[in-house]
Image (cartoon, grey):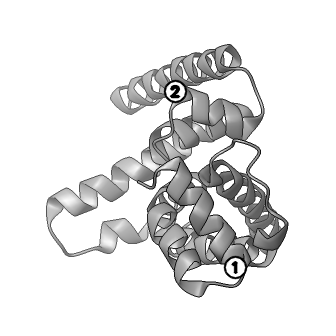
Amino acid sequence: MIENREEEALVLSAQRGDRDAFAQLYEATVERVYRYLLHRLGEPADAEDVTAEVFMQAMKALPSYKSRGTPLIAWLFRIAHNQAVNYMKKRARRKELPLIETVAAYEGPEEEVLDQVSLGEVVQAMGALTDLQRQVLNLRFAADLSIAEVATVMSRKEGAVKFLQYSALRALRRVWSQQEAGSHGR
């Protein structure tokens, strides 16, 4: 994790064209952006593609970036959110669906298959949430942001973020309870 002053110095250097400075910023943030997108999109290949788009967009827009006391990661998550929305719109027009079924054909360790099935169940359950609820959970748990950081990224008050997180987790519990009840009733 980069300290605020170090981040500011790297941003200024990157804005002046220093590719090494941008590379350091990339290395410090790419994993969090990828995890956020993976939880938003559900497919590793999609998350990788959109993560690359996020950083290409960030590189183009970096000269106009102004921190205003907000960490760079907040700016990157806004770009990631927009890129994910655009990607999902394109995917919906093409009528593509995630290939969660490929997990069943995987011939590897059971734990890896179970992890993928669990991810598929989480992605499916999160489909029942509102966009704001999904965004809060993705930022909090996939991107590992604090309540304060999520509030900054979403331009909301911390209390609103806490409420959205609470309501999202309650909704997920309801969905999982219904799924479990449905699977026992078969």
Tell me if mark 2 has few (under 14), some (14-19) or many (20+) residues whose alpha carbon lies within 10 angstroms of its own.
some
Q: What residue is rendered at 47% in x and 21% in y?
A: 173
- Residue placed most toward the observer, 31 or 36: 31
Per the image, label 2 sits on a secondary structure element best described as: helix
Q: Number of marks in the image?
A: 2
Q: Amino acid at mark 2?
A: Leu
Quarter of the image where one finds residue 51: bottom right
The answer to the question of whether label 2 and label 1 lie on touching residues, with beta carbons closer than 8 A, is: no
Judge from the rendering whether residue 110 lies leftward or rightward of residue 143; answer left or right: left
Query: x, y percentage for residue 11?
Result: 64, 66
- Callout 1: 10 Å neighbours few (<14), some, many (20+)? few
Q: Compared to 35, does 157 lie above or below?
A: above
Q: Secondary structure at mark 1?
A: helix
- The residue indicated by pointer 2 is 172
| Amino acid type, mark 1 | Met
Q: x%, y% of residue 89?
A: 81, 63
| Left-right relation of 90 to 33 | right
Instruction: Give me the C-alpha separation between circle 2 and circle 1.
Output: 34 Å
Q: Position of residue 39 (x, y in %)?
A: 52, 52
Q: Earlier in the sequence, mark 2 or mark 1?
A: 1
Q: Quadrant of the C terminus?
A: top left
Residue 43 can be seen, yes or no: yes
Q: Which residue is mark 1?
A: 56
Classify the position of the N terminus by image quarter: bottom left
